[in-house]
Amino acid sequence: MNKLDEILEYNKLFVENKEYEQYKATKYPGKKLVILSCMDTRLTELLPKALNLKNGDAKIVKNAGATIMHPFGSIIRSIIVAIYEFNTDEVLVIGHKNCGMSNINGEEIINKIISRGVSKETIDTINNSGINIDKWLHGFDSVEDSVKESVDLIKKHPLIPKEIKVHGLIMDPETGSLEVIIKDQ
Ligand SMILES: [Zn+2]
C-alpha cells in the first residue's frame, strides 16, 4: 500500500463520520489575517495553535523558508488576493529558528540533482537561459534579515495598500514562542 491509498482509506471514514463538522468555516478569514510562513513540518499544527488560530481564521501561505523570491511571484500574488478578494488587512511574516533554508547550499543541491539522474547539460542549459540555479536554490544566511527583507518588500510593494499592517516575527519551532522583529504601528 502506498501513502496515497492509506490516505484515501482514512479520508473515506473521515467524511463518513462527519469529522469535518468541527472545521466548518468560510473562505473569508475571520481574523482578516494573512500569514507567510515556512513549510517546516514542526510548524504544521504548532503555528496555528500558538497563534490561537482556528480553521477559517487566516489565510496561510507557505513555502521553503517563508521567503519571497520575486516581487511578482506566487507569494506576493497570494498576499494580494488575500487583501483584495478576502478582506485581510494585516500581514504576518513568520520565519523560524533552525530553518532548513538557513545556510542551504545551492551547489550541494545541484550535485544531488545530478546524482539522481539529471544531466549536467540540463543544469547548464537552465543556467545559460538566465536562471542562476545555485542562487535560486540558495536559502538565507540570517532568518532575521530574511524576515526583514520580506516585510520591507510587502510594505513597499506598489500594488499593496499603504494602510495594510505588515509585521515580522520569528517562531521557536520547539515551543511556538514568537519574537517580534518588526512591528508595524
Ligand atoms: Zn523553515
Image: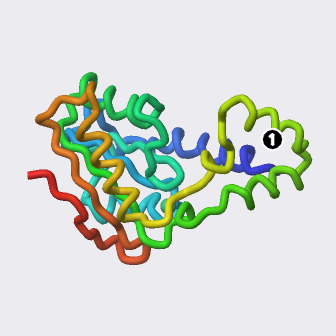
Let me know if residue 56 appears in the view. Answer: no
Q: How many labels does the image show?
A: 1
Judged left or right of residue 58, residue 36 is right
Q: Which residue lies furthest to the left in this view?
A: 185
Judged left or right of residue 72, residue 85 is left
Residue occupied by mark 1:
123
Question: From what the image shows, is residue 2 above or below residue 40?
Answer: above
Which color scheme is applied? rainbow
Let me know if residue 108 appears in the view. Answer: yes
Choose top left, top right, bottom left or bottom right for residue 115: bottom right
Residue found 26% across the figure and 70% down from its top:
179
Q: Determine whether the residue tagged by mark 1 lies in a helix, strand or loop.
A: helix
Position in image of residue 155 (x %, y %): 23, 40
Residue found 41% across the figure and 65% down from its top:
96
Question: From what the image shows, is residue 84 above or below residue 88?
Answer: above
The one of 112 and 34 positioned closer to us in this rendering: 112
The one of 174 and 181 positioned closer to us in this rendering: 181
Q: Residue furthest bottom?
A: 175
Position in image of residue 23 (x %, y %): 36, 44
Tell me the kind of residue under disc 1: Ile
Question: From what the image shows, is residue 170 above or below residue 25?
Answer: below
